[in-house]
């Protein structure tokens, strides 16, 4: 008789097109997928390369079946991510996860061999080794907050057989955690990842918040015992339900000074914690009282991540939490506008990276609808999953049909900003560097759709082994070649010609077939790379993925000129006023930091007095130290 987990497993094989692999290989992949999806639900649905990287398949490390690394709670999918995170955070806390199904003794020996031989490991063929070696290099170690945390995950290991690493391992790590999971625990993790979770809270004191004229659902202020909070945010095996913090824009900040203070209060003054702490905010689909308990449907902790993580760490460390109480605001609402307002409001009181709010902007909502309403003939429909797991309930949509914000910004940087050498960087870094160039309110949705179409469908061709496997790491370069060879240099994203360009290129791909275009691009890339090495020397064979010089060489080889299309920055702001000058021509000022921008009728013949107070887009040109705005266009709501 088949159970729910078996059915989920078969659906996983179908969704990821894994029918050509053995059932044993697919089971290991299934366990890796669900266990590590807890850290960022939905990420592995839209990043198949990361899932491949996590699922270790190495003869030398045959008993290491999963490898997953976090730096300051951020997933490491590239070595470049380490530099990006440390540039932002200055210091880093490294967490290393290793999952095994196999022989414990051999696993320990291979783990010892791994750490002792990192400098000699073949990092070119296995990305997880490259990331680990860089994370533990002297350059990065100097930026550590503390020694790394090692977490060893055993699947289906007999719990009666207690096992730990040899004592000498403890000198390398600040903490070693042992996690054992079996089929029952895996089922709990699967349910948690799918957010099909119903929780009960016992609470003695609660107050109903009136909804007012604009009824938003049921809301309560209550005082929760810490032990009830632990029950809410952990699985049956004591693992933290990380997807419960998916809507919290500010993830755990590790062992910061503030968090040390929280931990100290929990240990020394548990009865005062409720007075010293600001509390947490929980949003759920519904919140209803039920005979002294409160039933929460699919709860999300949208504020108080630091508080919850420190309570969890204290619980794991054996700190007594009997006297600890936490103030909680609980809102049960199905309305997205209410939920997003709570997320913004609850997190504005803390220091939050503005990039975390990006995908709740109107432009991204419009983009999401545009994807849902369009499809390229002959190809499967694609979706923009701007919110993690938003299409999880639709079993008709497979992972390879969904692009995340990360994939979208990376492909846009490569294709339409002509910075393919930057495209593998962390999304926070890309948004910071290119925020004036991308996701601007006046932009058409077409180029974003085209970028996503190429990203997803070229990835499918690589996964189906219809393109050379050794070029998979240069996927963005291949996409750029397809675009440039078939469509030529693209207009600026703010140009009126951009839609016509994208339509023409998509028509070409429809008629000639993307696979044929991709094969031609792969052949062209290999030819250009070979010529580059012949001209520059063998040492230049490596590092071309990050090289702006190679990108310029590639463009020159395609078009016969070194001239590149440079994306101009497009700004937005409000017009302060429009007046007439002494020559009876219009001029005005646009609000801008650090100083307002002048614009004139000579540059903007369509302007009139109605521009006053309107939101506009514009570009800036300079003449010496003077700046003025050109291409001033009203942004319609």
Image (cartoon, rainbow, N blue to C red):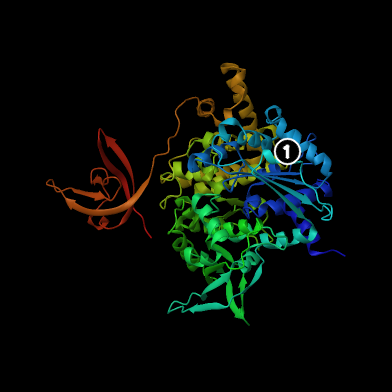
Instruction: Name the residue tied to disc 1.
Output: 168
Side of 128 relative to 354 (left or right) = right
Q: How many marks?
A: 1
**Residue 45, image x and y in percent?**
65, 52
Looking at the image, is 513 positioned above or below residue 228? above
Q: Nearer the viewer, residue 270 or 336?
A: 270
Q: Is 289 above or below relative to 504?
A: below
Q: Nearer the viewer, residue 470 or 4?
A: 4
- Residue extending furthest right? 1
Please state the horizontal and vertical placement of residue 7, each as a whole percent of the image. 79, 61
Q: Position of residue 566 (x, y in %)?
A: 43, 35
Q: Residue at x 46, y 59 (%)?
A: 347
Q: Residue at x 25, y 32 (%)?
A: 624
Q: Residue furthest bottom?
A: 291
Q: Position of residue 296 (x, y in %)?
A: 61, 72
Quarter of the figure with residue 557: top right
Q: Is residue 386 above or below residue 474?
A: below
């Amino acid at each position: 008789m088949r159970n729910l987990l078996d059915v989920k497993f078969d659906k996983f094989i179908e969704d990821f097109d894994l029918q050509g692999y053995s059932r044993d290989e697919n089971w290991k992949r299934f366990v890796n997928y669900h266990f590590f999806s807890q850290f960022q639900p939905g990420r592995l649905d839209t990043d198949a390369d990361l899932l491949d990287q996590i699922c270790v398949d190495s003869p030398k490390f045959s008993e290491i079946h999963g490898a997953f690394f976090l730096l300051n709670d951020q997933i490491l999918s590239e070595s470049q991510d380490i530099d990006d995170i440390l540039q932002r955070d200055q210091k880093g806390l490294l967490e290393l996860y290793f999952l095994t199904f196999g022989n414990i003794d051999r696993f320990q020996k291979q783990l010892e061999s791994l750490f002792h031989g990192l400098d000699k490991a073949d990092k070119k063929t296995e990305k997880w080794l490259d990331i680990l070696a860089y994370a533990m290099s002297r350059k990065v170690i100097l930026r550590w907050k503390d020694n790394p945390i090692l977490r060893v995950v055993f699947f289906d290991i007999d719990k009666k057989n207690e096992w730990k690493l040899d004592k000498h391992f403890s000198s390398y790590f600040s903490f070693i955690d042992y996690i054992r999971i079996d089929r029952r625990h895996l089922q709990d993790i699967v349910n948690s990842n799918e957010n099909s979770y119903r929780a009960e809270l016992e609470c003695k004191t609660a107050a109903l918040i009136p909804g007012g004229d604009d009824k938003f659902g049921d809301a309560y202020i209550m005082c929760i015992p810490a032990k009830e909070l632990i029950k809410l945010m952990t699985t049956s095996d004591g693992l933290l339900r990380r997807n419960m913090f998916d809507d919290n824009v500010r993830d755990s900040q590790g062992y910061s000074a503030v968090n040390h203070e929280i931990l100290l209060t929990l240990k020394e003054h548990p009865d005062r914690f409720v007075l010293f702490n600001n509390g947490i905010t929980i949003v759920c689909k519904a919140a209803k009282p039920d005979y002294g308990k409160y039933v929460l449907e699919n709860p999300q902790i949208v504020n108080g991540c630091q508080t919850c993580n420190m309570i969890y760490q204290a619980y794991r460390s054996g700190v007594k939490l009997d006297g600890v109480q936490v103030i909680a605001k609980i809102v049960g609402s199905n309305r997205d506008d209410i939920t997003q307002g709570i997320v913004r409001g609850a997190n504005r009181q803390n220091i939050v990276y503005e990039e975390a709010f990006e995908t709740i902007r109107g432009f991204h909502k419009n983009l999401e609808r545009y994807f849902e309403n369009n499809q390229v003939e002959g190809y499967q429909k694609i979706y923009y999953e701007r919110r993690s797991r938003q299409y999880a309930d639709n079993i008709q949509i497979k992972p390879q049909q969904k692009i995340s914000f990360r994939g979208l910004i990376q492909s846009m940087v490569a294709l339409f900003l002509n910075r393919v050498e930057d495209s593998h960087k962390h999304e926070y870094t890309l948004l910071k560097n290119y925020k004036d160039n991308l996701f601007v309110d006046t932009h058409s949705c077409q180029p974003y759709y085209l970028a996503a179409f190429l990203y997803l469908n070229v990835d499918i061709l690589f996964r189906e082994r219809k393109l050379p496997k050794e070029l998979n790491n240069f996927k963005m370069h291949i996409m750029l070649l397809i675009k440039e060879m078939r469509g030529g240099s693209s207009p600026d994203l703010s140009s009126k010609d951009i839609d016509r360009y994208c339509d023409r290129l998509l028509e070409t791909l429809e008629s000639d077939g993307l696979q044929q275009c991709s094969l031609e691009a792969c052949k062209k890339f290999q030819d250009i790379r070979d010529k580059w090495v012949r001209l520059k020397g063998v040492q230049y064979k490596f590092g071309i993925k990050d090289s702006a010089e190679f990108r310029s060489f590639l463009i020159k080889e395609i078009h016969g000129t070194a001239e590149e299309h440079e994306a101009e920055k497009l700004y937005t702001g409000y017009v302060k006023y429009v007046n007439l000058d002494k020559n009876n021509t219009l001029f005005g000022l646009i609000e801008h930091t650090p100083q307002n921008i002048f614009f004139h009728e000579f540059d903007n013949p369509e302007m009139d007095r109605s521009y006053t107070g309107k939101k506009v887009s514009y570009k800036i040109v300079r003449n010496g130290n003077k700046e003025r705005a050109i291409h001033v266009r009203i942004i319609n709501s």
